[in-house]
Image: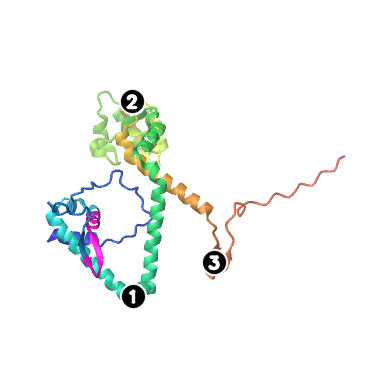
């Protein structure tokens, strides 16, 4: 019963897709199981794409059912065909009957319905155009080329593992620093007692981080030290005063292609969409109007330009 409800909910999803979708299409499409929703053991000599139902003369073919099956969530696609096919076909018959009834009632001429249909049509066209434009950027070959250009040749990035003691005042930081510098002192234990910052229970351990992960003042101090060193002076940031101890340094090579693939796809998708949108807008003839319908002049690069300074009068010669 739950699967039947899920099936109906999946089939009733709106067809329109928003162009502002933030993620690219999946790198590998859902497995297209040719047997999904197909009846087992079709009769010998049966047509490859038979009519499996008619609703008021409108045909539903086997390919239509299989296409709907491919759009279902994985949980439903994996149902045995002998269970999925009748459920899916019954839902498609219901949908076809409702659509036919709506057309017979001339609902397509209703202004609100017509506006919604136009929006769906526009969104579908927009999505199709953008998908066609960015598709070549998302192929395996294109992503590997981008990886070689942007990541593979990148030098290893340095990371530091450090601990810190965070205090509200410089005096407190200097007291903690003096205690941490005593022979045999345990920096982590001092941090647990004196630090007010996150991670104090873990002895101020910040784990490994890159230079860009920290605010500049902290990063400059941490990356200027070697393992085992404690900062010569407290470091002031917007959070307070830090006493820093560097535990380890390491150089991290670029990630392999397999790890970087999804981020590369996302970046390629966003760049491709932005470039295509800019190209289309640049080629379009655009007119702007105010809320009252009056023409609005397009913005110009000179709108905020300052006027030239008045000429300085020439000084008389003596």
- Find the distance from the CA under tag 2 to the CA under tag 1: 80 Å
Q: Left or right: 288 with respect to 57?
A: right
- Location of the C terminus (image quadrant): top right
- CB atoms at circles 2 and 1 under 8 Å apart? no
Check disc 1 and report the residue beneath it. Answer: 106
Residue 200 is inside the magenta segment: no
The disc, 2 or 1, on the residue closer to the chain's N-terminal end is: 1
Instruction: Tell me which residue sits at (36%, 44%) in the image.
Output: 266
The disc, 3 or 2, on the residue closer to the chain's N-terminal end is: 2
Work out which residue is located at the far right of the displayed protein and give it: 318
Boundaries of the magenta span: 54-68
Task: Give the image location of residue 174, x and y in percent.
Answer: 35, 33
Q: Which mark is residue 290?
A: 3
Instruction: Tell me which residue sits at (31%, 60%) in the image.
Output: 15
In-front residue for pair 199/104: 104
Residue 56 is inside the magenta segment: yes
Whether residue 54 is situated above or below residue 127 in the rendered picture: below
């Amino acid at each position: 019963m739950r699967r039947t409800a899920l099936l109906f909910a999946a089939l009733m999803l709106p067809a329109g897709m928003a162009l502002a979708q933030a993620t690219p299409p999946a790198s590998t499409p859902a497995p297209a199981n040719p047997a999904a929703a197909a009846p087992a053991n079709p009769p010998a000599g049966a047509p490859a794409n038979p009519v499996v139902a008619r609703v008021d003369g409108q045909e539903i073919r086997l390919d239509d059912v299989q296409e709907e099956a491919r759009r279902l969530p994985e949980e439903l696609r994996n149902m045995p065909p002998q269970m999925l096919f009748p459920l899916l076909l019954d839902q498609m018959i219901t949908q076809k009957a409702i659509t036919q009834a709506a057309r017979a009632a001339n609902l397509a001429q209703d202004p609100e319905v017509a506006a919604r249909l136009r929006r769906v049509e526009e969104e579908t066209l927009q999505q199709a155009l953008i998908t066609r434009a960015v598709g070549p950027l998302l192929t395996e070959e294109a992503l590997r080329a981008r990886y070689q250009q942007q990541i593979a040749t990148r030098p290893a990035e340095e990371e530091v593992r450090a601990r810190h003691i965070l205090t509200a005042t410089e005096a407190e930081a200097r007291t903690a620093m003096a205690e941490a510098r005593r022979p045999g002192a345990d920096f982590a234990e001092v941090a647990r007692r004196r630090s007010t910052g996150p991670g104090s229970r873990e002895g101020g351990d910040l784990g490994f981080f890159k230079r860009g992960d920290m605010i500049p003042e902290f990063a400059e101090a941490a990356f200027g030290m070697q393992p085992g060193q404690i900062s010569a002076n407290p470091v002031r940031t917007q959070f307070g005063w830090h006493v820093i101890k560097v535990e380890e340094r390491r150089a991290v090579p670029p990630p392999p292609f397999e790890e970087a693939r999804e981020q590369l796809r996302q970046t390629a998708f966003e760049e491709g969409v932005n470039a295509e949108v800019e190209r289309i807008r640049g080629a379009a003839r655009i007119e702007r109007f105010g809320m009252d319908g009056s023409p609005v002049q397009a913005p110009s690069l000179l709108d905020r330009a300052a006027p030239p300074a008045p000429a300085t009068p020439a000084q008389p010669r003596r």
